[in-house]
Image (cartoon, rainbow, N blue to C red):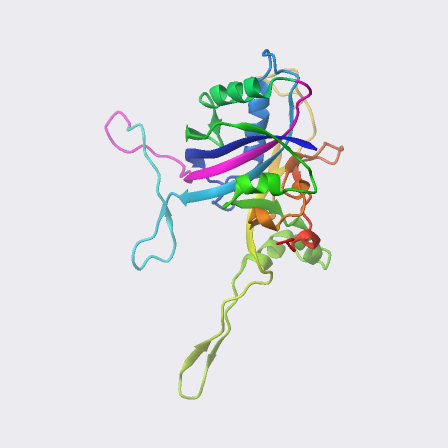
Amino acid sequence: MKDILLIPNIKVHHANALSSPYTIGFPAMTGWLGFMHALERKLKGSEFEAVKFTGIIISCLEFYLHTYKGRGDYVHSIVASSNPLDKAGKRPSFIEEARCDMEVTLAIECELGVLDYDKLTSFIDNTLHTMKIVSGDILSFKPSKHLEVDNDEPRGLTKYLMPGFCLVSRQSLMEEVMNEGMDAMDAMLEYLKVTTDIEVDENHRVSKSKPSRKESGWIVPIAVGYQGISELGLLKNTRDATTPHRFAESVVTLGEFKMPYHFENIDDMIWRYQAYQGDNLYLCKNNYSIKNEESKL
């Protein structure tokens, strides 16, 4: 059995929509696991400091990206604020940051031990009012609850995640084509591009095929962690002078949004931190496999 802390229908305003250094959209997985880690740290010093959060499931119920596309425009523009104004009352120079509003339900895998579950959920509800999620403000949420769910019988959990979409890893798609010698960026674009065949007959009539992708499903690029690009060492003038420092760059791969009823076990939905193994990679890991796609329904 798994202990799950369920936080339903969280409405988040102005969250960071930089899903990777190259794309905007649903917030990066590093941000969601960062929220889980920050929430666990809030438990320190309380009667629940022995509670451990080991993984998280994100079900997206609604999502609104702050962009605008006028009539005749080829691309969308980011809708950004310019606050505060400068001394002359003009808009200051700034780097555009994509923002979004969304409603999500979070299910956090826990190691609880023996404790008062009602007290824990009450403490979590009070704590959430003081926090942010992926840089966004928490506007409202329904009371959290504790669930005990069998990993191989996920219906006790997925009914609370509907009618949303859970993001899972499809890194295996990129690995397949990269093993054939394709560059990583080209491998990603291979699964994101939309192909339409156009034919013009002798009468100059144009016929188009139905737009298609290499892989079916809602495939998106996602950032899942960082790769170190310098050696570990100490750096002057940092917040923590005792923790080793290194420069890193984002690791981007493919993910897929799937409705919760597709999953045959809970582990396929959960994102966890991958233990550092000395390979300069600091990653968020999900164990979804396409072989489990077919539903019992």
Report the side of 36 relative to 100 (left or right). Answer: right
Query: Is residue 87 one of those drawn in magenta?
Result: yes
Residue 174 image position (x, y, % from top left):
66, 53
Residue 245 image position (x, y, % from top left):
64, 24
The residue shown at (69%, 50%) is 289
Up the image or down, 177 lies above or below 202; here it is: above
Residue 153 image position (x, y, % from top left):
67, 42
Span shown in magenta: 86-114
Residue 239 image position (x, y, % from top left):
56, 17
Query: In the rendered picture of this protein, how many numbered marks are placed on residues?
Result: 0
Residue farthest toward the bottom in the current orientation of the protein: 202
Q: Quadrant of the N terminus?
A: top right
Q: Quadrant of residue 99?
A: top left
Q: Is residue 17 or residue 185 the one in the foreground? A: 17
Q: Is residue 182 or residue 62 the one in the foreground? A: 62
Q: Quadrant of the C terminus?
A: bottom right
Up the image or down, 113 lies above or below 280; here it is: above
The residue shown at (35%, 34%) is 93
Query: Is residue 91 one of those drawn in magenta?
Result: yes
Report the side of 35 relative to 183 (left or right). Answer: left
The residue shown at (49%, 73%) is 209
Q: Is residue 238 visible?
A: no
Q: Is residue 228 or residue 138 the one in the foreground? A: 138
